[in-house]
Image: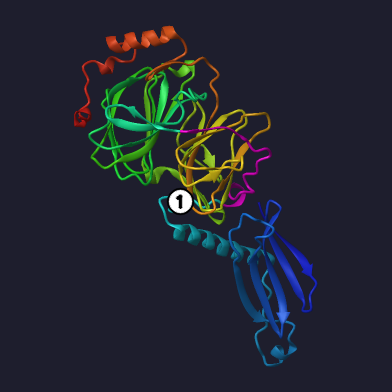
Amino acid sequence: MWSVGHRRVTSITPRRAIDINIDGCVIASIDVSIERGRRRSSFVVRRRQCPSFVSYRTFAATAPSTSTSRARARGARPWTPVSAVAVARRVLVALALTCVARAWCRGGAMSSAAVVGSGAGAGAGAAAVSRARAVSKTVLSREQSEGRGARVRRSIGNAQVRNFDPFLMLDEFAVGLPAGFSDHPHRGMITCTYVLPKSRGFMDHEDSMLNAGRLRAGDLQYMKAGRGILHAEVPTSEDVCHGLQLWITLPAAHKMDEPEYQELRAEELSRASASWDGVDAIIIAGEAFGVQSQVRTKETPVHYIHFAMAPGSELTQKVPPGWNSFAYTLEGSADFGDGVLIGPHHTVMFTNRDGEDGVIVKAGPSERAEFVLISGQPVGEPIEQHGPFVMNTREEINRAFADFQGAKNGFESARGWRSEIQYRIR
């Protein structure tokens, strides 16, 4: 909440200061003083009181003082004092323009954020965390084979972290032809494929329900497999397609839902920026800096945010109490709460104790840090998984295999279907 307050300042010359604060934190003040018949107003960002501000900014303007009788005698037009509200409005405009300029000048794949966080939704102080989560486990994701000729780094879903309710798997893939992921089925789960904004290559997909499309840099596909679908994912060329694929379990009540897609282009994804903190966000699901994603995750509620942080910056991000949460690092290094800088390709798992409602992350001092922060509401049901089939019991897994082989109970569309794109793979 923005507010403006007056205070008298003791000094040699008559002065008055106007403080501007957000939620009780004074971020700036306007000092008005009379010096040699001139009224001087200066705007100063107070970094000392709000450490999240990355630099000082001073704006000054002068005008004739109304107390100067000499000016009146010459017939000069007296200066009318500007109201505190008007001054504050001008300061807010200047501050907003400064934030936009910083975001524009920072460059990089995420500097084009469409929304600049402000007011209660932005800044480290606005997303205040009463008790930060601690790091419970850190695991380096090593490369392994997957699909046909493809290599991935598996985060969740490996021997060290089998699953993390509601998450079944997270793969970082970097794949170009002739490798790819040929025709394969799914049941009882959600797949979320996110092509990273800096990816050089693209990914094509086709499925047995005759859906087809192409995921370019920054694009997202959120697919609820439900009762059954057969699909393929294959790079368009030898250029490496770099991205993440997340698997999420569905509650028993929704495992046999009809399949459903949500597909968004890079420019359609929600973006936000706490510019004065040097933090940008692409909001795949959930909320950051007061900006919400349009992706629906109602069956299994999930927050999924791609953060990019300037060197030395700090992020405070809320996580719903009771949800499981982890980060996966992509570039640079960051401290996730235990005082240790974590480099790329690591899974950072957080505690989930009573009263813990967020995470605090500090970027390393010398390079930009990028990572995804993923949180989800635990389903709290048994997980029985065999490859791409995820059910609650072994009997349901056996039934899924029988349904797929017999092209029934959700797999009718798979009968005789073959994707065209799989023939690119050699």
Provide residue 397's location: percent of width, then percent of height.
40, 11
Quadrant of the rendering where the C terminus is positioned: top left
Q: Nearer the viewer, residue 260 or 389?
A: 389
Indicate whether 382 appears above or below 83: above
Pick the front one: 92 or 49: 49
Image height check: is 270 above or below 94? above
x, y percent for residue 244: 40, 35
The residue depicted at 28 percent of the width and 14 percent of the height is 412
Q: Which residues are magenta?
A: 118-140
The residue drawn where x is 47% and y is 45% is 370
What amino acid type is highlighted by mark number 1? Ala
Asked if residue 316 is positioned above or below residue 152 in the image, the reply reads below
Q: Is residue 293 located in the magenta-colored stretch of the structure?
A: no
In the displayed structure image, the side of residue 273 where residue 84 appears, left or right: right
What's the magenta bit mostly, secondary-structure-wise? loop
On screen, 85 above or below 114? Answer: below
Q: Which residue is mark 1?
A: 113
Q: Which residue is most to the top?
A: 395
In this picture, residue 328 sits left or right of residue 16: left
Considering every residue shown, the one lying at the far bottom of the view is 74
Q: Position of residue 289 (x, y in %)?
A: 55, 46
Q: Mark 1 Cα within 10 Å, few/some/many (few <14, many 20+)?
A: many
Asked whether the viewer can see residue 38, the reply is yes
Which type of secondary structure does the marked residue at label 1 adopt? loop
Nearest the viewer among 220 and 234 is 234
